[in-house]
Image (spheres, helix red, strand yellow):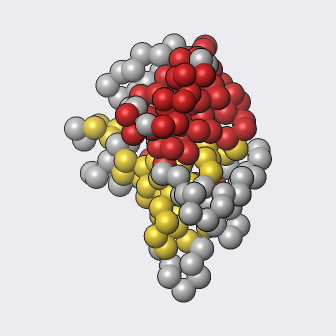
Amino acid sequence: MGHNAPSVPLGDEMTKDELILQHIILPHYQFFKPANAKKLAKSKPNAFNIEFLAEDTVREVGKHFGFCNGYLKDFADKSDVKTATVKENFVCASTRTQHQACIMGVSKDGREKEGALRIIFGNLPLQKVDLIYLPKKVWMKIAQSARGVLIGRYNSKTDEYPTFEKFSATVRFAASEFKQFANYQA
């Protein structure tokens, strides 16, 4: 799958929410098709619940899953959509290429999500969106269940998520492949 990042001029950095809104929600979510809705979203991105809109955009594009927005799943196939951030801070200050990739809320009240995670990363260092499908058997090996968190690394030099991509069952998509991501099933 593709991993090409658009270049963004310095000083025009977007937040995670702005990246997801610009690259995923606005191009794919029917609500934002009218020009006035897009203008509002671009001018006030923090006025929207990006997590809900990301879930609903996956529902709209991946129509066959059966959106249920359940307690530990978003879809009838038990998968769950998570938005996450690749942070600007460096995990390894000497190389300045290793960034933290953190996914919150993979468990609730001590119980794990029921299925795969469809993760939409706002990649702040490269100002792009990355999409990763993690089967439950993969993310359970990485999860810190007591905290409900997955913490991984992103290497901005190689454009890889080594914590997740070392497992062959992990599937990564570029933002331009959102339709494939939304419809992917292992």
> Vertical placement of 18 versus 123: above or below?
above
Of residues 127 and 94, the one nearer the viewer is 127
At horizontal 43% and vertical 49% (from top left) the residue drawn is 103
**74 with respect to 164 (left or right):** left
Find residue 56 and report its horizontal and vertical position in percent. Answer: 49, 22
**Which corner quadrant holds the C terminus?**
top right
> Eyeballing the image, is 163 above or below 30?
below
Q: Residue 130 location in percent, x, y? A: 62, 47
Q: Residue at x 72, y 38 (%)?
A: 176
Quadrant location, the N terminus: top right
Q: At which x and y percent is residue 156?
A: 63, 66
Residue lying farthest to the left in this orientation:
109
Left-right relation of 167 to 138 = right
Q: Is residue 64 above or below residue 42?
A: above
Residue under the point 57% across and 57% down: 12
Residue 169 quadrant: top right
Give the farthest residue toward the bottom.
94
Identify the residue at horizontal 36%, vertical 51% (top origin). 149
Q: In x, y percent, where is residue 69? A: 39, 20
Q: Nearer the viewer, residue 142 or 64?
A: 64
Q: Is residue 111 visible?
A: yes
